[in-house]
Structure formats: structure tokens, C-alpha cells
Amino acid sequence: MSRATFKPLTPPLVLYRNILRAHRQMPPALRAVGDDYVKAEFKRHKDVDNPAYIVGFLGEWEKYLDTVKQQTSPVAEVISASQDAQAAIEGREQQGSAWGKRIDPQLIERMSDEQIGQLYELRKESKRSFEEK
């Protein structure tokens, strides 16, 4: 039987600061929406005392931070400078996935109506921010 290795969770305040720092590499409109959303979510959940919920909350935000870092890394910027990579990025943009990633349908099925409503509001705000460019 093999043992799974678990990455220890980052303390909430450190994770929060790291996310906001990572957002500095994003386009201004996306950064504004992201910063506002992160601040609201961490504030909304600051008094949660259910350990299982805290672990899930922090774990999902760590995954988000990893995605943002990957998509804003200097290596990604250097690669995007080439024409082949630029064509790939333009193709992703046409599909609406230049930033972030698609949500697993099974995860959506497990969401509450309130969570789906929040996701919809975030989607609307994101679209509105990009249309204002």
C-alpha cells in the first residue's frame, strides 16, 4: 500500500497575499475583478470554524493560485512571443479560455444553488469588465 504525500496547506493570510501578488501579472480588468472577488470570498469565510470546510476552501484557492502562476509565468510570456505560440493563444482566446480553465462538470453538479448563483454573477462581472476595454 502506498502512502500519498500531502502538501501542507498555506496559512490563510499568506495564501491571500500570494493570490493578490499573482494577480499583479494579469491584465488590469481581469486583475480588478479577481482582486475584488478574492477579497470578498476571504472576508466572507474568515469566521468559518469547520476544519473540513477550511481545508477544502484553502485547497481550492491553492489550486487557483497555481493556475494563475502558471498562466502568468515569465516562461509563458516568452513562449507567447513566438508566432506558433501566439496562434495557439489566439485560438484559446476564441474559445474563451485564454485565462483560467473550465470547471469540471461533476464539480458543478455538487454545487449548491447559492454557489451556482455566485459563479453566474462572477461570469457576468468578468464579461462586463472585458466589454468595457
Image (spheres, rainbow, N blue to C red):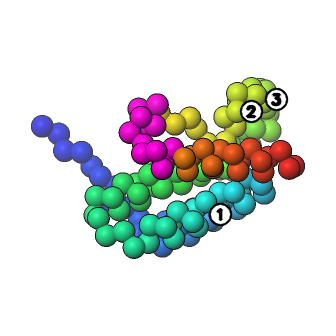
Residue 5, compared with residue 41, is above or below; it is above
Residue 60, compared with residue 110, is above or below; it is below
- Residue located at (24% from left, 45% from top): 4
- Residue located at (65% from left, 63% from top): 36
| Towards the viewer: 112 or 108 | 112
Q: Could you say where residue 98 lies in the image, as x and y percent from the top left? A: 70, 37
Mark carried by residue 93: 2
Any magenta on residue 114? Answer: yes
- Cα distance between the residues tagged 1 and 2: 23 Å
Q: Is residue 85 visible?
A: no
Q: Which residue is mark 1?
A: 36
N-terminal of the two: label 1 or label 3?
A: 1
Query: Hey, what amino acid is under mark 1?
Result: Asp
Query: Hey, what amino acid is under mark 2?
Result: Glu
Neighbours of disc 1 within 10 Å: few (<14), some (14-19), many (20+): few
Q: Which residue is mark 3?
A: 83
Tell me: 16 left or right of 46.
right
- Residue located at (83% from left, 45% from top): 131
